[in-house]
Image (cartoon, rainbow, N blue to C red):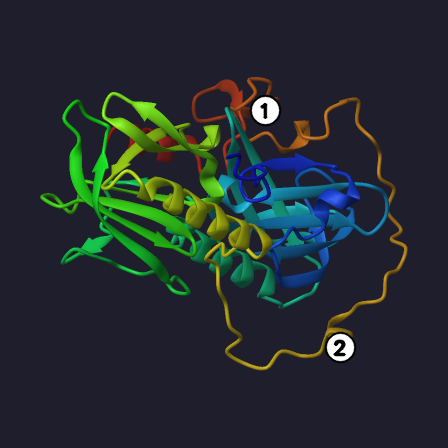
Amino acid sequence: MAMGQYIWQDREIRFDAQPRLLENRSGEFIIDSINSVEDTKGNNGMRGSLVVTNLRILWIAHKGKHNLSIGLKTVLNINIRKAKSKLRGPTQALYIMTQDANSRFEFIFTSLVKNSPRLFTTVQSVSRAYKTSSLYRDLKLRGSIIRDQQLILLPLEQVYNKIPDAWNLSSDQGNLGQFFITNVRLVWHANLAQNFNVSVPYMQMKHVRIRNSKFGKALVVETQPRCGGYILCFRLHPPERLETILKEICSLHKIFSVNPIFGVDFHEEESAPSLDALKVARVDDDVEIVDGDTNDAFAAYYAEGSNGSDNKEITFDNDIGLACEKLPDGWNMSSLWNVAGG
């Protein structure tokens, strides 16, 4: 049985997407929305709104069709550094380094509200919460998920069935273990080695079916290509239980699809102001946006060195008497020699 559509919102980066793709999917909810944020990297001088959900970071221009959808899975690191903004001048900005497939992209966002740390604190805390809740969304092999033959439950997780005498057919002889069926995943572990286990979230299942194997009929779980495309086979005793277990897994997957649990939770430590109090009236900026020659919306976001076409500013260095690439602020040739010399 096919197990539903691929969830891309947290795993991909999309540029200038259609408005319907910016809407929340089932299980996705808005954690924070900041009204005045500049996309300093790709649309310097353009004002927009930054929306942080439990799956991605969205930037939507106030005027025009420019937008960004940055999946939290693609985020490599987040830093706060100085940037040159057309709307605020030199100021502290949020730098987000990402990777989607084989390309790296850098995004720079500047808050246009003075002395407001919301842009920094919200994005950093949500990204941290996403990374620490990966068992809800990612297949895990040989993890620390079993203690004393019992599954270590995640927050909001409930065990619906525990099945003994479940054989993992990944080896020629098979391994005897136990199955746990919960509201967010399937978990199997070997009886003789608790660290020999696998955790498969429902959102990573592509197909679940019963097929014949050299050991007889087996439950086959195929995962999505983006998480490795694994094919896992399990034999249950007695074999007559296979149909019942398959129906139970399919039923729980349908329930999960209607209201997925992605694992990112949050709470407000203080009562936040009302939305009306946070809204800022939109005004026309006295800034002219000049379109570049590039036809690719994402070209401006390439991280340094990722596309092989970076044009560095050339300056004359008096210390060495040669022309060279301009060094970052705070660096000089002497400090580089000190680093190279240890």
Mark toward the start of the polypeptide (1 vs 2)? 2
**Residue 4 sits in quarter:** top right
- Residue at the image position 62 percent from the left and 67 percent from the top: 116
Question: Disc 1 designates what residue?
Answer: 312
Question: 307 or 24, which is in the foreground?
Answer: 24
Residue in front for this viewpoint, 279 or 310: 279
The residue at 15%/47% (across/down) is 194
Give the Cα separation between the discs numbered 1 and 2. 44 Å
The amino acid marked with disc number 2 is Ala
Residue 56, x across and y down, in percent: 58, 49
Lateral position of residue 282 relative to residue 77, left or right: right
Residue 195, percent from left and from top: 17, 44
Instruction: Identify the residue shown where x is 77% and y is 39%.
Output: 18
The numbered mark at residue 255 is: none
Q: Where residue 183 appears, x then y in whole percent?
A: 43, 56
Amino acid type of the residue tagged 1 in the rendering: Lys
Density class for disc 2 (Cα within 10 Å; few <14, some 14-19, many ≥20) is few
Q: Residues within 10 Å of mark 1 (few under 14, many from 20)?
A: few
Q: Is residue 148 left or right of residue 27?
A: left
Residue 240: quadrant of the picture: top left
**Secondary structure category for the residue under label 1:** loop
Q: Which residue is mark 2?
A: 277
